[in-house]
Image (cartoon, rainbow, N blue to C red):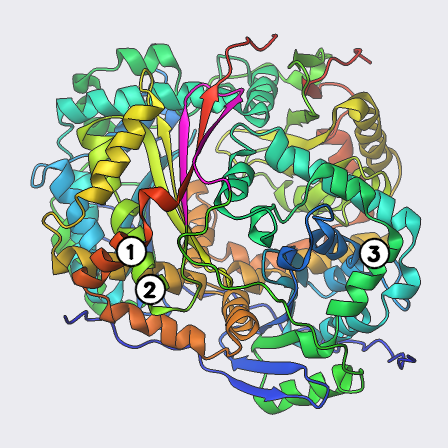
Amino acid sequence: MEVELKDFAIGFEAETLDNGLRVIVHEDHAAPIVAVHVMYGVGSRDEHRGRTGLAHLLEHLLFEGSANCPKGEFDRLLENVGGTNNGSTWFDRTNYYEVVPSHAVELALWLERERMAHFLPVLDGEMLDVQRSVVINERKQVYENRPYGLAYERLNELLFPADHPYSWPTIGYTPDLEAVTLDEARRFYERYYSPNNAVLVLAGDVTFEQGVEWATRYFGDLERGPDVGHGIPTTVGGIRGNAGTETLYDRVSFPRVYYAWSVPPYGSGDWIALDVLSYLLSDGESSRLQRSLVREKELVQQVDSYLYPTASAGIFGLVATARSGIGSDQICGAIDAVIEGLEMDLTEEEVVGAIRQARRDQLNGLATVEGRAEELAYAATVLGDAGRVNEIMNAYADVTPERVIEVARRYLSPEYRSVVIVEPQTTEVAA
Amino acid sequence: MTRAVLPRPTPGSPPVPEVPDPENFTLSNGLRVVCVARPQFPQAFARLVLRSGAAADPASRPGLAAMVGSLILEGTQELPALDFHTRIDRLGATLDSRVGHDFTEIDLGFLTESRGDSLDLLRQIVVSPAFPPMELERIRLETLDALEARLDEPANLADDLAADALFGGQHPYGRLAMGDPEGVAAVSREELVAFHAEHYRPDGASLIIAGDIDIASLRDRLERLFGDWQGTPPEIAYPELPDPRQTEIELANLEIEDSPQAEIRVAGLGMRRTDPDWIPGSVANFILGGSTITGRLGSNLREDKGWTYGVRSGFAAGLDPAGWVVETAVGAEVAADALREIASEVGKLRDELVDPSELARAKEALILSLPRAFETPARIVSRLATLEAYGLPGDYWKGVPDRIRGVTREQVREIARKYFGSEGLARVVVGPKVESA
């Protein structure tokens, strides 16, 4: 099959410092800005049940200053030069990044050096308590006090065995957050925040030579840390935690159905074919699920699918919200029918459309220097090679209808699926 | 392990922020076209801005403009709805409409290889939508469900109460742009057709395009596609409002049993987007709550107290004076404390001149963020659409750095006194019961 998509690649050069820090530089001089991105190979996958949320809580703490940069100063210094910064934690990685005008790259690198080398002296109980409270409030705001907010948490608990780290949410459980001690935070930091467990990407108005020189100046003298293995197995299809269907009751007006399957990990050929399948199922108004559930049967207000680019296993999910008067069982039946009927009239044209949609979203994600920095850092962190991001992007064009059907049949099987149904609770909300 | 302490580098002179120079032309039918070529990536974005939003709804039909905005995507004179969407999806394009209070905006995103077909689909929905009765009935029911579902979100309930307290039901900004159940239930196909015929007109509308485009051939292509589209839409009148700043507004407290958090809004009447106060207002607001970590509100409520994940404030842009709002969600048990701290921070900005270094930092942050604001074709379209929508001059963005630099400490205090008043602020708490202060 010919998809008329030109090969597209993010250009970069890479070098590894003696202490194991991987440095990647992507040059783009279109605007006088540079993304400075540090990604650590640590996430909630490195926690244990009963001690969840530590990786993310530590990320919060790492914005609270360092030995040579007091609390608050970090953000103020960046604001002074018109820079922006943020961080995030997920299953497999934690990242910190700044986007700065090109005159202030060294400042951003210095701040990241402070984060990697001079944090422990300032970590104290008061800092821990304030950020613990911020995170518990984050959990309330983003999950507990939102309609349907706890559904994904339950879905992944059902999808993976209790000792698999994808079975708990990255933000952690409140009792675990309450129990985190200073000593645990220290030990976690010492283990994972080392040059050899990090990738530094500079993307934008900077040259490779300059980037490597700066990286050496600000990180080259730091000692290598312990070698950390992550020790979680690749777990694909067929794992069953408590798999099955569970119903939650929430303050919502309409039932919502969540499906999830554990599938091959990010970067595999099957993962790419599954991503095309995801587009084909729900992206755009003419996609299979939209057409059937929204237009023809008028069962749902909206339906979406997603595929996580996760390292131990991919997670493929579907979410659909009922229209008024429609039951969750009708929705489940209709979704099952769409998946079962996938072969019907599946044309190359339809698959090519899905591939173009995927390309469109990839290009959108790469439109900013920060987006490119993150993609390179992520591939380097979870796949061990930044260049894989380009290979993956260009491999979509080779996906055929037969491949889409093959992965659908192999992985989206009902017996390995977790389902969460959120139903409106019957008690009235007091006005 | 000893680790060397390196001296903090001092950045040299910042790069001069550059904003793109668009190429403008007007088609023979009056449609203004603004384009910027950015060929780095093989895709482009376009936005059509029509100066008719929910403010054009007749009093008896709240939601009419929004329903028209939804239905133009549901079939044209040339293609039934599903065929139309199949075309879009096969091209890997996106086509969406958004109806706000002041404007209807139609966004198109496309890969370079499909530009001709994509622009033709844009033409079809703008010039010749079919409003099929069957699709109207489906969209009507979906919209009614969406109106109900959004009330499940405590944050939406808080937003609605704040809008109502400031603008009431008589001004469009006091109502939802998507309408209300009565209006949506009653709207007829004839009304949709008539609204479209009256308001979807090229004279006064703008099409902004940025990305991998060839501007020379674009003009001919657009003239061919849109040349037959003709006409001028009516001016939309906004009702005169009594100034809410003159009155004491009671605390609006909606209780939700066992709510883990309090959604809080503190809101006042702001200004038109074209108001000369907009730039000093942006600086003053940035100091108070423009950034959740370094703003005064965030430093206090989040970084010092740990009460919230985030707190921000901002002026909304409008053709008419729109709102200014502080928004946050805090632990239910500290709702009253948070209201008090917000009032205290706002009061300080009214009473005391800001520290010169704090002002300088806010200015640098705003000025030097401009290159990021224009980094991608989609962002360029968005920034230039703002100029077109509000009728701001074409060199507006070029002048922004100097205007920001000129803001003084006294001006910041003036802004706080004028807009962050001690009276006339609406306060909303959704979640726990709080005693009215």
Residue receiving disc 3? A184
Residue B57 in percent (x, y) is at 34, 20
Chain bearing tag 2 is: A
Amino acid type assigned to the residue bearing label 1 in the image: Arg
Q: Does B361 appear in magenta?
A: no
The amino acid at mark 3 is: Glu
Q: Is A140 situated above or below B259?
A: below
Q: Is residue B79 visible?
A: yes
Q: Give the letter of the chain under mark 1.
A: A
Please tell me how crowded label 3 is: few (under 14), some (14-19), or many (20+) other residues with Cα within 10 Å: few
Mark carried by residue A270: 2
Q: Which residue is mark 1?
A: A410
**Residue B382 location (% of width, % of height):** 44, 51
The image quadrant of residue B5 is bottom right
* Residue B128 circle label: none
* Of the pair A75 and A320, the residue shown nearer to us: A320
Residues at discs 3 and 2 in contact (Cβ within 8 Å): no
